[in-house]
Image (spheres, rainbow, N blue to C red):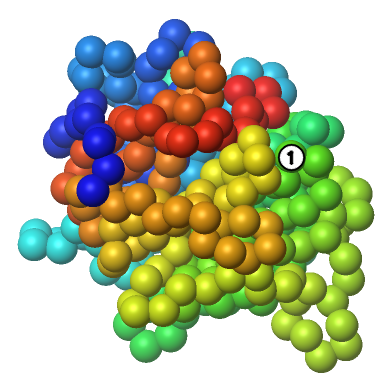
Amino acid sequence: MSDITILATGLGFPEGPVVCADGSVVLTEIRNRRCSRVTPDGKVHLFTDCGGGPNGLAVGPDGYFYLCNNGGSRYVEGHSMGLGPHPDYKFGYVQRIDPKTGEAKLLYKEVGGHLLSAPNDLVFDKDGGFYFTDLGKRHPRHRDNGGVYYALPDGKKIVEVAYPILSPNGCGLSPDGKTLYVADTEGARLWEFQVQGPGKVKPKEEFAPHSGRMIAGLSGGARFDSLKVMASGNIAIATLNTGYITEISPSGEIVRAVKVPDRYPTNLCFGGADMRTVYVTLSDTGRLGVMQWPEPGLKLHFN
């Protein structure tokens, strides 16, 4: 078990942590349909009453926060995970949030004439655009296809990058920006895509569903959630059901697996002067934990 300190409790299925310059952590609460700020003393404050199902969060080149919103999930007593779409769910979307006022504005809700289903996580490239995953909503008897997309923060361009993917969740870029990593939840698979330009990856083969190459996978009921890339190029993935942070090398080898006190660690982010302080959203128990990692995480663009 990791030496982890619990910083905050009482959160509604937390996700999407972002470390801010003042040492606070802004995160999403999917169950509570809002984003919150956790100050270093562990106090929780409302950041934005964004509604829907706020999930992945990142800071853009303009200093605003960009949010992947799955449109809302149904939660019932006794279950920490969402159980299908919320009764008022219509579609998923991406929002732009004013860091001073918390005002959340709709940025994208469709791509190529198709409504987004359940945007999940995002990462900005050095050019100021962002890749984001759409997990796809799970319905009682079917599920929407997932995909990966690329968009600009001004709301004027969004394109399809890879489609379909079963359940794309976390995403991140290699230190040189030439590889996009995508964690596939079901089956705990890690895909890599070769980036050929902003929003462009190596084309798929004729009969392939997408152009990703699977570099790693786990067995035993594990499921992958969100990820962060290390300064070394390794990929740290929050691993559901088993309750680990799994660090995997670009060649697919498991470097380390650190147990955390929760079966649903959903996301992580790095901060501190040496980028070795890692914050982990422990979503089954609604907590935010903090611990030290053996090596530094990769500093994100614009954050």
Percent of width and height locating residue 14: 31, 42
Residue 100, placed above or below residue 68 = above
**Image quadrant assignment for residue 15:** top left
Percent of width and height locating residue 168: 56, 65
Q: In the depicted view, which residue is nearer to us: 80 or 194?
A: 194
Q: Is residue 12 visible?
A: no
Residue 150, placed above or below residue 81 = above
Q: How many marks?
A: 1
The secondary structure type at the circle numbered 1 is loop
Q: Residue at x 35, y 39 (%)?
A: 280
Q: Is residue 255 visible?
A: yes
Q: Residue at x 25, y 35 (%)?
A: 4
Return the residue at label 1.
175
Q: Outermost residue toward the top?
A: 22
Residue 199, placed above or below residue 113 = above
Q: Residues within 10 Å of mark 1 (few under 14, many from 20)?
A: some
Q: Residue at x 34, y 22 (%)?
A: 37
Q: Residue at x 52, y 14 (%)?
A: 273
- Three-letter residue code for mark 1: Pro
Percent of width and height locating residue 1: 23, 48
Percent of width and height locating residue 279: 38, 33
Q: In the depicted view, which residue is nearer to us: 226 or 220?
A: 220
Q: Quadrant of the C terminus?
A: top right
Q: Is residue 170 left or right of residue 29?
A: right
Q: In the depicted view, which residue is nearer to us: 253 or 213?
A: 253
Residue 138, placed above or below residue 224 = below
